[in-house]
Amino acid sequence: MLGSVAIQRYDVEHMFVLGIDPGLTRTGYGVIESSGPTEKAVAAGVIRTDPAQRLGERFVELARDLREIVAEYAPEAAAIEQVFVNNNRHTAMSVARASGIALLVLSEAHLETAEYTPSAVKMALTGSGTADKQQMQRVVAMRLGLPSRPTPADAADALAVALCHVQHRVLNARIS
């Protein structure tokens, strides 16, 4: 006699996730809609600030534009690429500043926010923490059903961060 097997079903709610690839000159953003096993791109782009402007003005502009994106797309969750410390201290500092502004805006909106390192995003999407930009863009396009690789790179990275977050939510729901 065969015993009965209980099959557990893991429902993942329908949600919009905002991904952010921070930078002071260019901040990539991507909004994806996730509904169970289906994910699709809703919006992606880049917020640009003028390096000739005063630093404070750039902060205000970045915060204002991020608030507009949050208001327009009303995401339920957000994910941001963690600051990567490289050899260029100036670049790392400007990314850290942009990241702080993004985290402030997301916190003001009371969004569940997660941070992922670049290698964690690459690992989640490709299985390799050292995947190159082209490979990442191909995977993002495939997962989101896009006809071609998303560009510019900052927007593609933001979509990848959002996909990484959705994937982590699914795994965490299964573990719980």
Image (cartoon, rainbow, N blue to C red):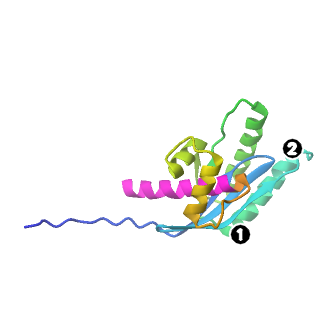
- Vertical relation: 129 (above or below) 30: above
Farthest-out residue, left: 1
- Vertical relation: 140 (above or below) 24: below
Label 2, on which residue? 55
Left or right of 69: which side holds 140? Answer: left
- Locate the C terminus and report the quarter of the image it occupies: bottom left
Q: Residue at x 55, y 62 (%)?
A: 143
Q: Main secondary structure of the magenta part?
A: helix
Pinpoint residue 36: horizontal percent, then vertical percent.
Answer: 47, 68
- Locate the N terminus and report the quarter of the image it occupies: bottom left
Pinpoint residue 84: horizontal percent, then vertical percent.
Answer: 66, 38
Mark 2 → mark 1, Cα distance in angstroms: 26 Å
Q: Quadrant of residue 48?
A: bottom right
**Is any atom of residue 107 visible in this view?**
no
Residue 13 falls within the magenta-colored stretch: no
- Vertical relation: 2 (above or below) 123: below
Tags 2 and 1 touching, CB below 8 Å: no
Q: Residue at x 78, y 50 (%)?
A: 26
Q: Residues within 10 Å of mark 1 (few under 14, many from 20)?
A: few
Farthest-out residue, right: 52
* Residue type, label 1: Glu
Where residue 72 is drawn, which disc sits there? 1
* Residue type, label 2: Leu
Pinpoint residue 105: horizontal percent, then vertical percent.
Answer: 70, 55
Q: Quadrant of residue 144?
A: bottom right
Q: Residue at x 57, y 56 (%)?
A: 139
Pinpoint residue 112: horizontal percent, then vertical percent.
Answer: 57, 56
Left or right of 100: which side holds 120? Answer: left
Magenta highlight range: 156-176
Q: Quadrant of residue 106?
A: bottom right
Q: Residues within 10 Å of mark 2 (few under 14, many from 20)?
A: some
Left or right of 54: which side holds 135? Answer: left
